Amino acid sequence: MAFQITFQPSNKIIFSDQDESVLSAAIHQGVNIPYGCRNGACGACKAKILSGQVHYDTDIAGLSSQEIADGYALLCCAKPDSDIQVECRELSSENTIMPKIFPVRVEKLERLSSDVIAMFLKVPVNQPMHFFAGQYIEFILKDGSRRAFSMANPPHSGEMLELHLRHVPGGKFTDYVFNELQEKTILRIEGPFGSFYLRNEIDKPIIFVAGGTGFAPIKSIIEDLIFKQNLNRPMHLYWGARTAQDLYMANIAKAWANHIPNFSFIPVLSSAENDLAWSGRRGFVHQAVLEDIQDFTDYQVYCCGAPEMVKACLQGFTQQGLSEQDFFADSFNYAASPPAA
């Protein structure tokens, strides 16, 4: 049974059934609403249900009990039980690229650290991959399940996609990539997805916060800015990792800091107690940002990493004056067991 979904204040109408999330229906019917992880962790697609009922098939982490009581839902996981009206912010149609399914060839696999691989994917010559810097693709596995990874390359080099994959022991897909996948293998992907891309209409200074392989989409954004010579806004990149080895492209970030005016790079290690050679910052990355910046009123934040890090950044920064409208996040889940298809 199809239910009617009405978005307010635009009054746009789409249709979805009980097996399709509100967000999935919106993506495929041309309604451009903010979203990130599509698994209920980042909270980017939070919206208020004005009327009607929704349900969730899995537990969600991106809403507080008070927000649920106040009628808020995460549209990436919420599925309708009736006709519903949703109050949510919509993005400009200029920022819409409809996702497509592509065959891709694994062109190269490059080990970046003990547990991170760069995968380079060749797209068909007659099907270039159009995307906004910071977006992601999903691999479609043989059983129909999916795995999401952000592009680390900028859009102008879209004929070759660069992804950074962290090995999750016991993870079906990353076990396969690290132990069995061969170059020249053909895989299927769909994309682009996500609203984690730079808002160019605003000139506030930017704080980038990356955790682990959350560096990938931020690399895409910064390299896109370099290509477009759009470097007028002050930028601060905080990259949190466990050890120095986990800062697998620190040389690139250091080069940006050396050559881009008003750009700073602050690496932060959370497990460097026994690393006597490390003279940089220690602790959690969000704490390092809070130590350096006391008032976030005039900043935009782009944050990508584990759900716990994203949540800590949002809570800490908004308490120090950051508007939620200036916080953009993509939350990575490193699951050892596959999510529901």
Image: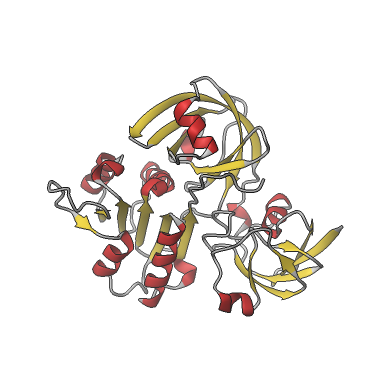
Q: Could you say which quadrant of the image residue 146 lies in? A: top right
In this orientation, does residue 208 appear?
yes
Q: Could you say which quadrant of the image residue 49 lies in? A: bottom right
Q: Position of residue 143 (x, y in %)?
A: 67, 35
Q: Is residue 121 above or below residue 20?
A: above
Q: Residue at x 56, y 28 (%)?
A: 123
Left or right, 24 with respect to 255, comes to right
219 or 182: nearer the viewer:
182
In this orientation, does residue 201 appear?
no
199 or 5: nearer the viewer:
5
Q: Could you say which quadrant of the image residue 203 lies in? A: bottom left
Residue occupying the far right of the picture: 1
Q: Is residue 329 above or below residue 143?
A: below
Q: Residue at x 34, y 58 (%)?
A: 233
Q: Position of residue 273 (x, y in %)?
A: 19, 53
Q: Position of residue 33 (x, y in %)?
A: 62, 60
What is the quadrant of the N terminus in the image?
bottom right
Residue occupying the far front of the picture: 170
57 or 138: nearer the viewer:
57
Q: Residue at x 41, y 74 (%)?
A: 318
What is the quadrant of the C terminus in the image?
top right
Q: Position of residue 94 (x, y in %)?
A: 60, 53
